[in-house]
Image (spheres, helix red, strand yellow):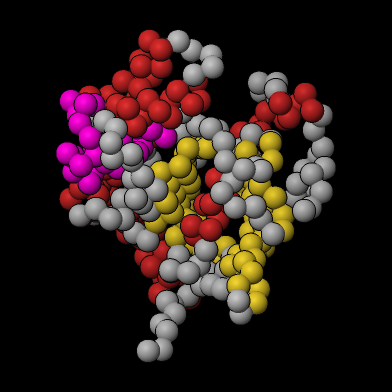
Amino acid sequence: MTSMGKIAGEPVLSAQERAHPAPGSEASARFLEKYLVVDDAGMVFDTKKGAFIALRDINLTVAKGEVVSLIGHSGCGKSTLLNLMAGLLRPSTGHLLVGNREIVGPGPDRGMVFQNHSLLPWMSCFENVYLAVERVFGATEDKPGLKARTQAALEMVGLSHARDKRPGEISGGMKQRVGIARALAMEPKVLLMDEPFGALDALTRAHLQDELLRIIAKTQSTVVMVTHDVDEAVLLSDRIVMMTNGPAATIGEILKVDLPRPRDRVALAADPAYMALRTRVLEFLYRKHQPVVEAA
């Protein structure tokens, strides 16, 4: 592990500054600009064939309230990087911070939404969300407060009417909305999403993308999302992190998405700035870093 004293040449902050930076201070500005930090991280897996270098030299900062997409071809380590942020994996080299605290494992400060909704099939939508709420807030709030939090989360994703239904009784898109509600109900500092809409049909995916835009605008959430969908990345993101091909993948380019919010997909479809951003991502993926096709 690298030293925790400085990150990329930044001045050392006192423990008090790190925990409670004064509003408007230089320390506060740094805290907001570098809310989630990946500092020189690498990931090596031990396999039967020897060491497999999945990621190398990953350096990334995410500001508070920013939406960042990770995009690249299969095998480029997008999900591995997200799992490092979630604390599901520990980096082989370097370290990660959120809110000036090192990420050493999973925690309620980071909510995770998977492509597979991971709902408990014997519980209702309400109970699935309540379970997460109780785990995070059960020691400090009474049952009416926990239930109110759960109901508010379901209302945010438009699922009040389905609160008593079980996962087997609702559509795939609704299941994903329950997963998003469960993550948001924990009030995480960072929302991590691993291709949350990848398994859905095009119309449902578009609807949930629009829902996510609305939720992000309302909650001012900090979001890091893995996607294979170029249009999704441009529509939702403030920046797009484009990964090189694996193994030993790293960040190839970072593209700023300078489109005003709120964003409307129909209006953007003919927007020259939107099309130019989309073209930049496609050029990176299919000209600079073509997908690797394995021999049969």
**Relative to 196, residue 215 above or below:** above
Q: Which residues fall within the magenta stretch?
A: 161-184
Instruction: Specify the quadrant of the image occupied by residue 41.
Output: bottom right
Instruction: Specify the quadrant of the image occupied by residue 24.
Output: top right
User: From this viewpoint, is residue 215 visible?
Assistant: no
What predominant SS class does the magenta segment belong to? helix
User: From this viewpoint, is residue 282 visible?
Assistant: yes
Determine if the magenta segment contains residue 182: yes
Pick the residue in front: 195 or 179. Answer: 179
Pick the residue in front: 141 or 274. Answer: 141
Instruction: Provide residue 156's location: percent of width, then percent of height.
Output: 30, 27
Q: Is residue 274 left or right of residue 69?
A: left
Instruction: Provide residue 48's location: percent of width, then percent of height.
Output: 60, 76
Q: How many marks?
A: 0
Query: Which residue reaches farthest bottom?
Result: 296
Instruction: Provide residue 23's location: percent of width, then percent of height.
Output: 66, 21
Residue at horizontal 22 percent and vertical 46 percent from the top: 172
Residue at horizontal 33 percent and vertical 40 percent from the top: 119
Instruction: Provide residue 155's location: percent of width, then percent of height.
Output: 27, 24
Task: Pick the quarter of the image with the C terminus.
Answer: bottom left
Instruction: Specify the quadrant of the image occupied by residue 12.
Output: top right
Residue at horizontal 81 percent and vertical 39 percent from the top: 11
Pick the residue in front: 189 or 257. Answer: 189
